[in-house]
Amino acid sequence: MKIVMALDYFRPNVSGLSVYAERLARGLAARGHGVTVVTHRHEKLLPAEEQDGGLRIVRAPVLLRAGKALLSPALPRSVARELAGADVLHLHSPLAAAIPLARLARRRRVALVVTYHCDLRLPPGALGRLLESAARVSQNYALARAAAIVHSTRDYAESIPAIAARLDRFVEIAPPPPEPRSGQAGAGAAELRERWKVGGAPVVLFAGRFAAEKGLFDLLQAFETVRRRFPAAQLLLAGEKDRVPGESVGRRLAALASDRSSGVVMPGLVAPGDMDGLFDLADVLALPSTNSTESFGMVQMEAMLRGVPAVASDLPGVRQAVLRTGMGELAIPGDPASLAAALLRVLESPSEYRRNAPAAHAWFSLERTISEYENVYRLARNRSLERGPVRYNEITSRT
């Protein structure tokens, strides 16, 4: 099949959405599908077009930025060029250009599939509210015309009115985990501990973008409580902290990196080859997100596959990894006391949570995720020619 994916940000931007899309696109290309990713040229030095492995990446120039939101009339034009002979147009939402892209798919009779990753939340203010409202109208327009709507959990889908009204077209597909490592291994836990001067234990890990909705300030307060029980505990805040569009969290936390007495270590973005070592170093993962811009938290999946329990916010979608595997605890969103209590429950009895790791391996499979998307694409392509929706019960059962 020829598949065109469209999304606002792609690599080298690092976010759950861009990582998800990249893993899926590379997995599909490895199976022989023609995959083109059309995205914004969010950094001026990025090439307008490139071949990266089996992927073709096309980047449209950005006309306007408003926080994280990017606007570009060139992006629909780029997609239009790529749709010749395409079987599927796959939108990764939230996506500013969803209306013109959905209309393009309709006119060209190309199957439209939407993966609804999360809600869009912009900084407060009149402009932010205006752009959020416009984005909601745009996403609803695309969802109304999609042959299939995908998300990682039905729990989250039912919490979003625009999807809950269209559950006959909804398909739950687990997010794509990373490919198994091959070749030379990256740094191990001992090497990373030495490199980053992580001198104590247990280690509480956060891995993700330094963004307001990630709840990092709640985690810092909770960590103070953890240290009263475990004085040598370390809080490892790993991830992109400086180049996060529309965010100042990294700058606000910068002073902690130089205060060794705080127990907080901020190594920055971790190389993909070092992720195994990072999880081996951790005793528990914290995912204290505060709102619906977090809809699953793929880092939980990666941690659990490596045997690391998680403490996650009790939010739709986000809570499912803990509930389905038993590998962790849930905390009230935005409540540092609840977060601290959940972290301490895990740290007091870590083996009770680690023993459930087989449940994570039973749920998350890259090959199964790609196969399920292939099934959705085929059904969407066939039904788009008939102007009919995909029905959930037509998706073949998991293998």
Image: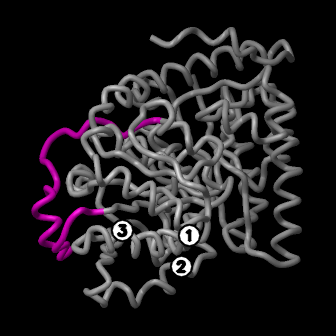
Q: Residue at position x 76%, y 56% from top? A: 96
From the viewer's perspective, is residue 234 above or below residue 304?
Answer: below
**The residue tagged with tag 1: helix, strand or loop?**
loop
> Looking at the picture, which amino acid does disc 1 mark?
Ala
Q: Residue at position x 45%, y 21% from top? A: 368
Q: Nearer the viewer, residue 206 or 311?
A: 311
From the viewer's perspective, is residue 7 above or below residue 338?
Answer: above
Q: Is residue 199 magenta?
A: yes
Circle 3 residue: 226
Circle 2 residue: 249
- Magenta segment range? 176-203
> Looking at the picture, which amino acid does disc 3 mark?
Val
**The residue tagged with tag 3: helix, strand or loop?**
helix
Label 1 with label 3: CB-CB less than 8 Å: no
Q: Is residue 156 magenta?
A: no
Q: Residue at position x 82%, y 62% from top? A: 132
Q: Residues within 10 Å of mark 2 (few under 14, many from 20)?
A: some
